[in-house]
Image (cartoon, rainbow, N blue to C red):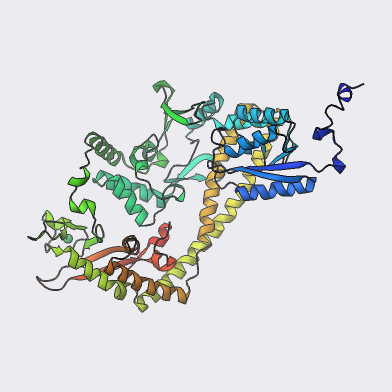
Amino acid sequence: MRPDRIFGTATAQSPRDLPMTNARLRAVLYARYSSDLQNERSIDDQIALCRIYAEREGYTVTKVYSDKAKSGATLFDRDGLIELIADAKKRLFDMVVVESLDRLSRDQEDLAAVYKRLEFAEVEIRTLNEGKATSVHVGLRGLVGHLFLRDLGAKVRRGHTGRVKEGKIPGKVAYGYRAVVGKPGEREIDPDQAQVIRRIFEEYADGKSPIAIAEDLNREGIPGHNGKPWQWPRLTGGPRALLTNRIYLGEIHWNNWRNVRNPDTGKVNKRPTAPEERVVVKVPHLRIILDELFEEAQAVRIARGKKQKIPPKGQRRPWQRNGSLLAGLLRCETCGSSMVRGQGDRGGRPRVICTSAKVGGCQHTKSYDEQMLESVVLNGLHTQLADERLINEFVQAYHSERAVAERAARADLEGTKRRLTEIEAGMMRLVGFLEKGTMAEDIIASRMKDLETERAALRERERLALEATNIVELHPKAIERYRQAIATLQEDLASGRRPESRAAFRNLVDHVLVKPTEKRAPYEVTIFGRLGALLGLDLYPAKRTPREILVFCH
Ligand SMILES: [Zn+2]
């Protein structure tokens, strides 16, 4: 007689001993959205899939648990999962349905811990693809997760070092580059982004502050890394700072830092590696910045690091506290230099002057009362930016521009989608090899990592291409709304009612040319608006592509 039959009566309450036909098993669903995987399935989508599965299997869904935006690398802070385990102990359900095991955890130890606890509570784990999870699945999946999660796993690292020596870059694609389709680990320069990199280095070497650089880029709607807004601390601070990244010189520096996860808090620390572990490889085809400019920027950075003195709040100069509406937007019509505050007049009213004229490099030496200039610009806003003839020209230019962009995006999208399918098939094959044990783990790990990297880059590309094919049609009504928006903005600015109208103004206006006029003659300005503002009609757009930032002028 089989031993489990002897104790059969004692365990009759266990769901596994009940015949499947007449039992409605109680199932709960668990979903996790992870912030470190791009374009992941949302919680709602995961739940919907799990629900379909549960219905097909005849389970009764009693509760749904979820955790948002957690990395999955650690159990800390995962309230949903912790509650689920607690409820499992109380035998409130018989099954957990998840999309895949790595939703529960991507850490081997944690996944095993979750599995053991659920198994003890006689709760089964069901995944959409594999069905009932066994300890073999858990072990395998945990191993896969473990290998890919931890960069410092020595095997993966060795594989990477070898690839770095071949000039390939493991890990994320730095701003300024894109992944080469079909060639994992290879990069090529993204011409648009490279231009932004050069601009940042030049401005920084010229003494512009990282805050001003980031603000201007955001104001111009130039998207930062992965389409996100620019954050100034990322320019100079931390191990991945843009202005210290030697990849822009065409050098891969590998292994300078290692990640160590604190097992008590789950947080990652970066620590420098020993010099002999570091690897440098020259990749001249990826150079964006010349040595001299790079060194200049480093000199500025080091000098700034020494004397970081911010005046205490009460002692700041008035312009530091309350910037002019036109600050940074004024240009001299004669030489194109920016215009800044010079000496104020006797009453302390600020006056602006051409920066070049200040040092004798421009004949346009007249200074302008800042507030008067402001009111001239405000009055001209509607007439200059909402002129009908002008708008019609933009509309035409926009439509032809858009047609070109769409064609290019569509062609790109097809190729990207094809390659994504190939990559996913490749990943499935690797998992197959791992399960069969027909290929060495370290080789699988390093190939998987490459595929994941390429996939992330391609998904980003896919997103951008979709964005480009989804540009809103410019409707005549929209143009009317735009004109009204400018009129409202003009009123708001004049009355000072809405503080956010200042930001809207700076979003709408790219720059203002100041024309030299005779002494005591009225001021003359030309306002240059942004095409994007006309298109979006939202004076607070989150991000725009470089193409949309073409300025239009009157
Ligand atoms: Zn000038």
Q: Position of residue 480 (x, y in %)?
A: 42, 76
Specify whether residue 361 is in view: no
Q: Locate ligand 1 by image quadrant.
A: bottom left
Query: Who is closer to the viewer here, 303 or 40?
Result: 40
The quadrant in which the C terminus is found is bottom left
The quadrant in which the N terminus is found is top right
Question: In the image as oriented, which residue stretches furthest toward the right?
Answer: 1
Q: Position of residue 444 (x, y in %)?
A: 62, 31
Image-quadrant location for residue 131: top right
Query: Who is closer to the viewer here, 16 or 73?
Result: 16
Question: In the image as oriented, which residue stretches furthest toward the left?
Answer: 346
Q: Position of residue 349 (x, y in %)?
A: 13, 61
Q: Residue at x 9, y 70 (%)?
A: 519
Q: Residue at x 71, y 45 (%)?
A: 62
Horizontally, residue 252 falls left or right of residue 415, namely: left
Residue 11 position (above or below residue 513): above
Query: Who is closer to the viewer here, 39 or 349?
Result: 349
Q: Position of residue 379 (x, y in %)?
A: 25, 73
Question: In the image as oriented, which residue stretches furthest toward the bottom?
Answer: 389
Query: Who is closer to the viewer here, 302 or 254?
Result: 302
